[in-house]
């Protein structure tokens, strides 16, 4: 009888990092050449072992850019992308949550200036 209660109590500690908000939002149309990126999670993350990659439209010379992360947050990935041209982009994120699991995701967005 006690084992199921203990299992339920342990579940919140084992939750993976899940995106609760992002800037840009998925499928958002951005109208400026620079973008402040902010991806917020439901739990603490290890930003030092996290990555943020910007996939650039196929018409560009460079297919992807690793964005340097800005520090200071324990539940968010922040970065800045500059000189964005018109086209469809994807933010590929990867983070290590405090439960030791790697979580990955994609946030597609478009630039139309």
Image (spheres, rainbow, N blue to C red):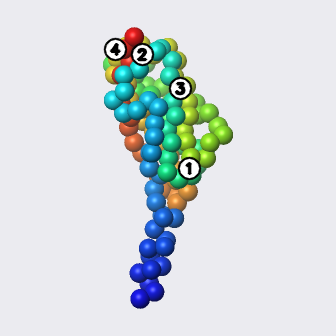
Q: Nearer the viewer, mark 3 or mark 1?
A: 3
For residue 109, side relative to residue 73 (left or right): left
Give me the C-alpha separation between circle 3 and circle 4.
Answer: 23 Å
Q: Nearer the viewer, residue 50 or 14?
A: 14
Q: Earlier in the sequence, mark 3 or mark 1?
A: 3
For marks 2 and 4, the one nearer the N-term is 2
As helix, strand or loop, the secondary structure at mark 3 comes to strand
Judge by depth and name the residue closer to the eye, 58 or 13.
Answer: 13
Q: CA distance from mark 4 to mark 1?
A: 34 Å
Give whichever of discs 3 and 4 has the lower sequence position: 3
How many residues crowd mark 4 within 10 Å: few (<14), some (14–19), many (20+)? few
Q: Mark 1 to mark 2: distance in Å?
A: 30 Å
Whichever of labels 4 and 1 marks the residue nearer the N terminus, that label is: 1
Instruction: Tell me whether circle 2 and circle 4 mark residues in contact (CB < 8 Å).
Output: no
Disc 3: which residue? 36
Q: Earlier in the sequence, mark 3 or mark 2?
A: 2
- Residue with the mark numbered 4: 59
State which tag comes first along the sequence, 1 or 2: 2
Does 85 sit left or right of 97 as displayed?
left
Q: In the picture shown, does residue 26 fall above or below 56?
A: below
Gap in angstroms between the C-alphas marked 3 and 1: 19 Å
Query: In x, y percent, where is residue 61?
Result: 41, 14
**Measured Cα–Cα span from mark 3 to mark 2:** 12 Å
For the point 38% across and 37% down, the residue is 106
Which residue is tagged 1? 45
């Amino acid at each position: 009888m006690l084992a199921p209660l203990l299992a339920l109590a342990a579940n919140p500690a084992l939750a993976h990092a899940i995106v609760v908000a992002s800037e840009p939002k998925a499928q958002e149309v951005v109208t400026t050449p620079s973008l402040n990126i902010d991806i917020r999670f439901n739990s603490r993350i290890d930003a030092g072992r996290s990555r943020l990659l910007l996939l650039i439209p196929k018409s560009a010379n460079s297919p992807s850019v690793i964005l340097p992360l800005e520090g200071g947050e324990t539940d968010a990935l922040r970065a800045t992308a500059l000189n964005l041209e018109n086209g469809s982009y994807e933010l590929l994120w990867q983070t290590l949550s405090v439960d030791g699991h790697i979580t990955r995701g994609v946030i597609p967005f478009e630039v139309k200036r």
